[in-house]
């Protein structure tokens, strides 16, 4: 190996050096990581990675990392010609809405989301008919067609702010019933909800959290607002995945339990060696469809490109841009 190659390999490995053995990283990931770095340059591409991506993606090939809100904000300012979304399909649609003239790639088109699949455009129309004049706030975890029927979007990071910005006593908040109930409890604004759930966060239980507290006295518990309200009631605080990272950066807790998807703690453990992560994680099989080989293949073939019909895109973009302006 030349000195140059070994220096750049060192730099690529460094961010995961606290959580992965070098020989394992070399054997499983190094070749794909280097190929992806080359392809990004050749294609003038950037990779946007969600916090639930595995560490070898999140720390070794991503250019922009964050929660759904941060990725949507970043997508507004991307200069590259090609955007690869290391995340799920609705995130790629959001990036395409904000960059209609760029090529947006999702490395596995089957990377869906139980929330996005839990409601259709027709469901939204029925809710609007049954509740005339009530504004529709749609979680970004939804299809472009559903967003197009909405007044404004929100993410878990800005849901409270978005809902309060409307200045009304009652909103239709879809599709995540638990997020809506949790925001209702925080704001006192009445929510008309829809019975869709995140298949990852709905599995956590209050009993499980109490058991972790017994085994780890003094542990700080932070839960994602997609969890059931009964789980949030057991937590010390709640927040989006970015708010979880900020909390650790600001407070340096000795021991923390993040009630969310597995890779969240893995990625933070690489950055915060002083904090012990208790991990009652549940895995998102959709997020895990994205791998180094599928990202490499996407860049080699320029597949799968995300496209949104123009009539849907215009209204969906309006709802996303309205959120970003709040
Ligand atoms: P945030 O990253 O916005 O907190 O969302 C979590 C999630 O489940 C995304 O699919
Ligand atoms: Fe959807 Fe839940 Fe997976 Fe996020 S974690 S993509 S909300 S199923």
Image (tube, rainbow, N blue to C red):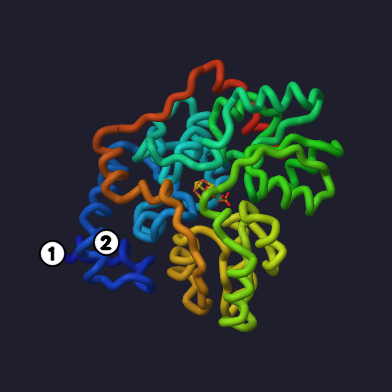
Q: Residue 158: in sight, yes or no? A: no
Nearest the eye: 71 or 279: 279
Nearest the eye: 247 or 263: 263
Identify residue for label 2: 8
Which quadrant of the view contains residue 230? bottom right
Q: Quadrant of the N terminus?
A: bottom left
Residue 128 in the image: above or below residue 209: above
Q: Residue furthest top?
A: 311
Label total for image: 2
- Residue drawn at the location 67% of the way across and 38% of the way down: 194
| Tag 1 secondary structure | loop
Residue 86 in the image: above or below residue 305: below
Identify residue for label 1: 1
Which quadrant of the view contains residue 112? top left
Q: Is residue 174 left or right of residue 105?
A: right
Residue 39 in the image: above or below residue 6: above
Q: Earlier in the sequence, mark 1 or mark 2?
A: 1
Rounded to the nearest angstrom, the CA distance separating label 1 from label 2 is: 11 Å
| Tag 2 secondary structure | helix
- Residue drawn at the location 74% of the way across and 21% of the way down: 129
Which quadrant of the view contains residue 237? bottom right
- Residue drawn at the location 23% of the way across and 49% of the way down: 35
- Residue drawn at the location 55% of the way across and 51% of the way down: 67
Question: Residue 233: where, in percent of width, then height?
Answer: 72, 64
Question: Residue 26: where, in percent of width, then height?
Answer: 22, 64
Question: Residue 211: where, in percent of width, then height?
Answer: 59, 75
């Amino acid at each position: 190996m030349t000195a140059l190659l070994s220096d750049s390999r060192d730099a690529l490995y460094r961010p995961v050096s606290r959580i992965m053995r070098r020989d394992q990283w070399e054997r499983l990931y190094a070749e794909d990581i280097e190929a992806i770095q080359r392809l990004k340059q050749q294609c003038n591409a950037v990779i946007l990675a969600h916090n639930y991506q595995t560490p070898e993606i999140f720390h070794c090939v991503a250019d922009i990392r964050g929660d759904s809100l941060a990725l949507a904000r970043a997508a507004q300012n991307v200069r590259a010609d090609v955007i690869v979304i290391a995340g799920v399909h609705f995130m790629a649609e959001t990036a395409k809405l904000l960059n209609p003239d760029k090529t947006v790639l999702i490395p596995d088109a089957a990377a869906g989301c139980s929330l996005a699949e839990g409601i259709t455009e027709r469901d939204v129309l029925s809710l609007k008919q049954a509740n005339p004049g009530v504004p529709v706030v749609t979680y970004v975890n939804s299809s472009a067609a559903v967003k197009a029927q909405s007044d404004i979007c929100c993410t878990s990071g800005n849901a409270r702010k978005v809902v309060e910005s409307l200045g009304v006593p009652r909103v239709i908040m879809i599709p995540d019933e638990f997020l809506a109930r949790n925001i209702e409890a925080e704001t006192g604004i009445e929510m008309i909800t829809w019975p869709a759930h995140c298949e990852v966060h709905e599995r956590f239980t209050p009993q499980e959290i109490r058991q972790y507290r017994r085994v780890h006295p003094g542990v700080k518990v932070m839960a994602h607002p997609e969890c059931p309200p009964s789980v949030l009631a057991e937590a010390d605080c709640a927040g989006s995945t970015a708010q979880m990272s900020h909390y650790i950066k600001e407070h340096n807790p000795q021991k923390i339990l993040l009630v969310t998807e597995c890779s969240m703690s893995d990625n933070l453990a690489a950055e915060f060696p002083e904090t012990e992560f208790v991990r009652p994680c549940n895995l998102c099989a959709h997020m895990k469809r994205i791998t180094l080989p599928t990202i490499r293949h996407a860049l080699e073939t320029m597949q799968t490109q995300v496209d949104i019909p123009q009539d849907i895109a215009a209204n969906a973009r309006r709802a996303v841009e309205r959120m970003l302006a709040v």
